[in-house]
Image (tube, rainbow, N blue to C red):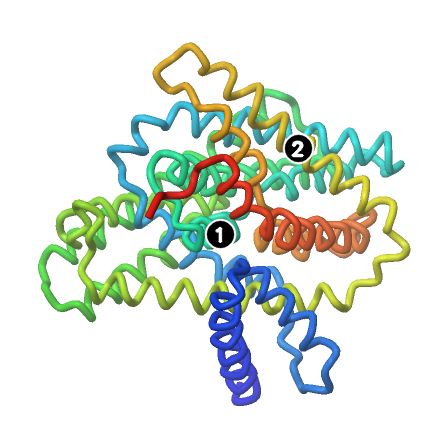
Amino acid sequence: MDTVLKQVEFLLLVAALVAMVARRLRIPYISGLVAAGIGLAFLPLPLDIPLTKELVFYTLLPPLIFEAAFYIPWKELKTDLPVITAFATTGLLLSAALTAAGMHYAAGWEWPPCLVFGALIAATDPVSVIATFKEAGVHGRLRLLVEAESLMNDGTAAVVFTIAAVIAGGSTVSATSACLMFLTTAFGGIACGLVVGYGLLKLAGRTNDPLVEITLTMVAAYGAFFLAEHFHMSGVLSSMAAGLLLGNSSELGQFADKPRPSLAGFWEYAAFVANSLIFILIGMHEARQNLMPVFYSAITAIGFVVLGRAVAIYPVAACFAKTKLRIDMKQQHVLFWGGLRGALALALALGLPDDMPKRDDIITVAFCVVAFSIFVQGMTMTPLLKRLGQLPKH
């Protein structure tokens, strides 16, 4: 335990230095973290923190999901909820299906691993997306659409992945039972988050102690996640629901996007720590992947993942073209290119059972897609925003 704490302290020191350098060089912070992790992997240092599903999914992801949802204003979200839901359901299914078909017909994979890979890689990681948009200074409807869609997409992708894993395991699942499983897992997760959030909200209303409020929000982030997972519901959607509820409540001072300074400071730092550890560890483990045996599969996957994201955005957005929820074409381009992959996809891949066909290939290819997403899409996101005129004018 003492050794792990020392390693974490060292990685946080590296993260702080990377943050300073990234700001000076004007490069995305997450790209700098992954690059630093790759560099650390080649140094003779006693760093052996394993990147596991338990670490990412159960330890680092809940506070990140909660923190992102905590700052989303419900009034604006409610207006765009139909289009965000369409992206995170219909769009995600289209993306997953196209990626799975591409891996089957172009890369020659069997259908079971194709379905699993298509489902897990369809998740656009809110950790990557939100960090990039914060650095770029993007605000308004575009940021709301990207962040909220990414959060909801994350939750629905985890649900679709569960269904795909069941099918890949040899179980027969009818269309009706698959839809029922999806609805139960998704809405059950949301219900768990609202129950936990409401209970802790009542407690928060009885105190003005900032330390107690911070503690209650941390309990909400993890409590909602673990309660939902205990009942085989969506922990991601549960933490998201709890974050939305608490973040838009008067008890915690979140009206007008101004939570109490102590609360805001704590969650900003918590997000910084979780982000730093996730992406440095991704870089370290990326450097250890043997890419040559799966090089063609990785290139194929990257192509179909990008194409799948296009199919998830443009046709769905076209359905709202003649409504008040119409999305400007420039903003559609940002939504398309801003669909970064990251921690959740890797967590789901690393959690696959050992007897899953092509398990090692799925993990390695997922790492390659995430690397492309972080370095290529992440590094070009701000120039794209600037070219499309989507950055705020100072």
The amino acid beneath tag 2 is: Ala
Disc 1: CA contacts within 10 A as few (<14), some (14-19) or many (>=20): many
- Residue 204: x and y in percent read 16, 58
Q: Are marks 2 and 1 in contact (CB under 8 Å)?
A: no
Residue 34 x/y as whole percent: 62, 64
Note whether residue 206 is visible. yes
State the separation of the CA atoms marked 2 and 1.
24 Å
Specify few, some or many for label 2: CA neighbours under 10 Å numbering under 14, 14-19, or 20 or more. Answer: many
Q: Is residue 282 left or right of residue 318?
A: right
Dot 1 amino acid type: Thr
- Residue beneath disc 2: 96
Which circle marks residue 132 in the picture? 1
The residue lying toward the viewer, choosing from 154 and 45, is: 45
Closest to the observer: 227 or 352?
A: 352
The numbered disc on residue 87 is none
- Image: 259 above or below 210: above
- Apparent side of residue 118 relative to residue 21 in the rendered image (left or right): right
The spot of residue 154 in percent (x, y) is 51, 43
Residue drawn where x is 65% and y is 81% of the image: 47
Q: Residue 37 in the image: x percent, y percent?
A: 64, 71
- From the viewer's side, name the closer residue of 155 and 41: 41
SS state under label 1: helix
Q: Give the left or right position of residue 252, taking residue 382 as reference.
A: left
Residue at 49% over, 83% down: 9
Looking at the image, tell me whether mark 2 or mark 1 is earlier in sequence order: 2
- Mark 2 lies on a secondary structure that is helix
Q: Is residue 352 visible?
A: no
